[in-house]
Amino acid sequence: MAERGAHLTTAAPAEDRPSVFEVLAQDSLMNAVKPALLHAVKILATSNPARYGVLWRRFDEIYAVLDVLLQHHFLSRTSASFSENFYGLKRAGEDGTRAAHLGLRRRQHWRSLFLLALLPYLHTKLEKILARQRDEDDFSIRLPQSFMQKMYRAFLAAYPFVCMAWDGWVFCQQLLYVFGKTRTHSPLLWLAGVKLSYLTANDIRSLDLKPSGPALSPSQSFREQFQHWVSAAVGGVAVSLSTSLSIGVFFLQFLEWWYSSENQSTVKSLTTLPTPPPPLHLHSQETSPTHIKVCPLCRKVRTNDTALATSGYVFCYKCIYVFVKANHRCPLTGYPSGLQHLIKIYAPDG
């Protein structure tokens, strides 16, 4: 039985095709990096919102820039992404004769870079925009009036089916790859016009001997020297990122497991936000009931009292809704907050 199913997990010697376990492992490697870094940044932002809050608010953009630098460096020098190179793989065209140290062809390089780094960023931003729009729709009951509103609601209704169709395509592609019916296990590789193969002994030797870049000549113009220094700086950042990820990849996977849904109860007990101190005016003996009901944002008597769960402070519903939607934090404590943390307070007499 084992001999009959061996072809499903082992590449054919003549084809130089990675096994399904290797290609899925390199896919899961980069998928584990971002959630782990996100949790680390969240802990930093929670401990010191004033200093590290910008990392939390701009995490997607910062991660996208670093990812572009990292993937561009590896695609140019090894014809592979970081995770593919980590598992000894490379990207090749249909002929598969191009050496890895030469990098991909220009068209394949930019397609791969877009699909590896920029497309996931655009997908993440689209998901967040749609989530915010759904939250806004939950707070308002209105029928679509204009053509754009009708198109938007139609897109919201069709988006889950588009995601389901994409997931089905990925599953079918992987299934065909297992049975040797296709050269790529992912539609993204097919769109980039490349396939995965093993690094050969000549590729590894050439990569070890490849210089870091062209030498700087005194006879070069200022523009050429400036381009050299920029290229060297970008390459240095990419090398630093790759070295850090190579060392900490197992630690990042541990963080992803630690913050998984199975361990949320443990993590919540260890990373719960501290209870904020009570407002200073509560200690004053001259405080009047009217002053206690003042909204900290508009400085007027609160209307539609709403508590922010991350800090415990109470505001006007409109004030805190607008502030949290724009800044994603508590206006008084700076704790990271979202619209899901707003809690309406209803008085017994009202």
Image (cartoon, helix red, strand yellow):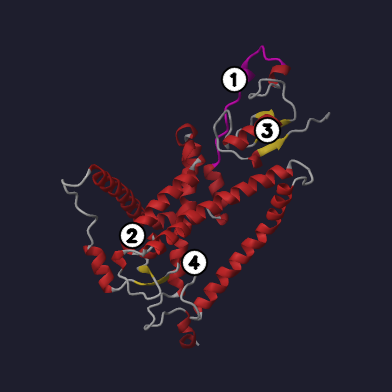
Q: Amino acid at mark 4?
A: Leu
Judged from the image, the secondary structure of the residue bearing numbered disc 4 is: helix
In front: mark 1 or mark 4?
4
Q: Is residue 216 left or right of residue 118?
A: left
Residue 80 image point, x, y percent: 37, 64
Question: Which comes before the other along the chain, label 1 or label 4?
Answer: 4
**From mark 1 to mark 2, how far is it between C-alphas?**
58 Å
Residue 164 image point, x, y percent: 63, 64
Mark 1 surroundings within 10 Å by alpha-carbon count, few (fewer than 14), some (14 through 19), many (20 or more): few
In the rendered structure, find residue 191 and report the number of the disc placed on it: 4
Instruction: Provide the residue designation for mark 2.
Output: 76
**From mark 2 to mark 3, how far is it between C-alphas?**
52 Å
Question: Which comes before the other along the chain, label 1 or label 2?
Answer: 2
Q: Which of the 4 image quadrants contains residue 82?
A: bottom left
Instruction: Provide the residue designation for mark 1.
Output: 280
Provide the residue span drawn in magenta.
Answer: 272-288
Q: Amino acid at mark 1?
A: Leu
Instruction: Provide the residue designation for mark 3.
Output: 307
The residue depicted at 62 percent of the width and 32 percent of the height is 323
Q: Amino acid at mark 2?
A: Ser
Q: Amino acid at mark 3?
A: Ala
**From mark 1 to mark 4, how far is it between C-alphas?**
60 Å
Residue 77 image point, x, y percent: 31, 60
The residue depicted at 72 percent of the width and 47 percent of the height is 149
The residue depicted at 62 percent of the width and 18 percent of the height is 281
Dominant SS of magenta comes to: loop
Q: Are marks 3 and 1 in contact (CB under 8 Å)?
A: no
- Residue 141 shows in this picture: yes
123 or 313, nearer to the observer: 123
